Image: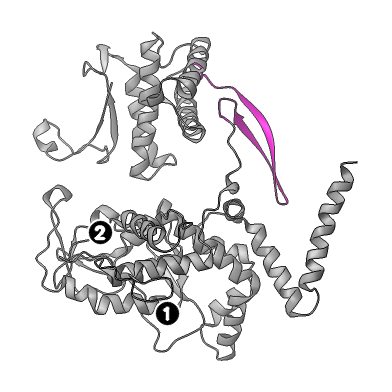
Amino acid sequence: MELVFFKAEGWESWGLEHKPVIPDGMPVLIDSDLCFEDAPASPRPLVAANRWLRELPSSGCPEPGSWGVYARAVRDWAVFLDDHGIGLFDDRARLKAALSSYAVHRSSGPLEVRFAATTWNQHVSILSSFYRWAVEEKYANAEPFTYRQATVFFADQTERRMVNQAARRVPKPHVTIKYLEGDFAELFLRGLRGLGPNGEDDRFRGRELARNGAVGGAVLDTGLRLQEFTYYLAAELPPLPPKPTALPIPFPVASGIAKGRKFRTTWITYDKLAELHHYCDVDRVLATEGAAWRPPSRWGSPLLVSETDQFGGRINGRRICWEGLRPVERRRLVAPDGGAMLLAVRADGGPFTAWPTVFARTAARIRDRFEPRFPHVHPHRLRHTFSIATLARLVSGYYHQAAQLVRDTDAEAGLALYLAKADPLIVLRDLLGHTSVLTTEKYLRRLDMTRIFRDAYEQAGRDHGLISDAEAQREADAEFDEDEGDLW
């Protein structure tokens, strides 16, 4: 069985009257004999599978990057069934027997085909969705999965949900520290700038250190995802306020690059935004002004930009808003004075996208030269770091105090009121772009949220003379004394 990805280029020569409605990049499953039916009007099961794939964008999976994951899950399952003489839409007893064998195959089969528990659960979720759709559309009479009803308690909410019995149990995810503590975060930023632990020159002769430091600092300050900061346009940067401010500055994230295509506004401090503007005004200009860079032909034709502002520009003569531009389109944009339109560019003016490599190499250099305990750093670790640091500031009243300062001067009154009145988790939910506070709370529990509240409580007690360090230690010791008493 083959997996290919549809591309409509040249459809005029296919003998069709109209352009196909299948989106570019949509995966298509094809049997090895390249046939979709065994006889006229007798389509094979893969025809139904391909229809399900084509409906993914309108049934809860709008991201093109996820379509291939869904297609591979169905393909691997269909190939396994075919090897055992079982049809994709066979009767329930045969499908359940095949599922049991498939679970063993993926958990303890040959090394190259084994799945981790999380990967297996992802495939189970995809196949469950596929079979539910197939039953509803009358392609299948039954599915191989068994469900049980469970009651989930979270905070003060109760939810009833169906649990797939084929899913594996996984360890609690919060046992691993997934963010950088404050001193390590600062060490990482200095490493991106080519500096040593104390800000001294560490004789590192890397390239584009101003770019790396400015963008890395902004990521730690805004919590942007990899796709969001990689394809952020220089023209989209919010203007720098005329004078420094303690209040964080709204930082918009366009729907075209945000996860789930949901526009949101996070924030950034004055200092980090000033670094970005300095990079754009100096180093970035040197790289892009008059640059002859053009996107390679495999990306598509260049999109020439003119008359730009923060919200849009003319692309090939037509006024377009940046908001809806997807990553594949953003990297093809050519600025009026030359070079790419992305915020981060290479020395030749082209778009720079290799951020995972930059972060990994910086972390490795820090481990080798300064701190052997320094962890591996991937882009999402910086987002986790932003989350935990922002919650700490919110809980301790940092942004409340900033809002009070601004409210006294009657500036940015709306944002000041929001910061002063909103629950910290609601603020963080909006900054991260989560759908609900429950999502944010579950996310934070994987990052040791309880430590944040504990530290804020103890610090407030010490500041107001309500509790001393010695008293806090005695209270903690008493908790363990009670545990020991329970043993007897």
Amino acid of disc 1? Asp
Q: Which residue is mark 2?
A: 330
Q: Is residue 439 in view?
A: yes
**Quick check: is 157 in the magenta stretch?**
yes
Q: Is residue 221 in view?
A: no
Image check: 441 left or right of 119?
right
Dividing the picture into quarters, in which one does residue 449 lie?
Answer: bottom right
Q: Which residue is mark 1?
A: 271
The vertical placement of 372 against 409, above or below, is above
Residue at horizontal 35 percent and vertical 38 percent from the top? 67
The C terminus sits in image quarter: top right
Amino acid of disc 2? Arg
Secondary structure at numbered mark 1: helix
Image check: 82 left or right of 38?
right
Residue at horizontal 85 percent and vertical 53 percent from the top? 481
Mark 2 or mark 1: whose residue is earlier in sequence: 1
Q: Which residues are magenta?
A: 141-168
Image check: 71 left or right of 152?
left
Residue at horizontal 82 percent and vertical 69 percent from the top? 471
Between marks 2 and 1, how big is the CA–CA gap? 27 Å
Q: Give coordinates of residue 224: x percent, y percent.
A: 42, 61
The vertical placement of 213 against 71, above or below, is below
Q: Give coordinates of residue 439: x percent, y percent.
A: 57, 52
The vertical placement of 331 against 421, above or below, is above
Residue at horizontal 25 percent and vertical 52 percent from the top? 328
Secondary structure at numbered mark 2: helix
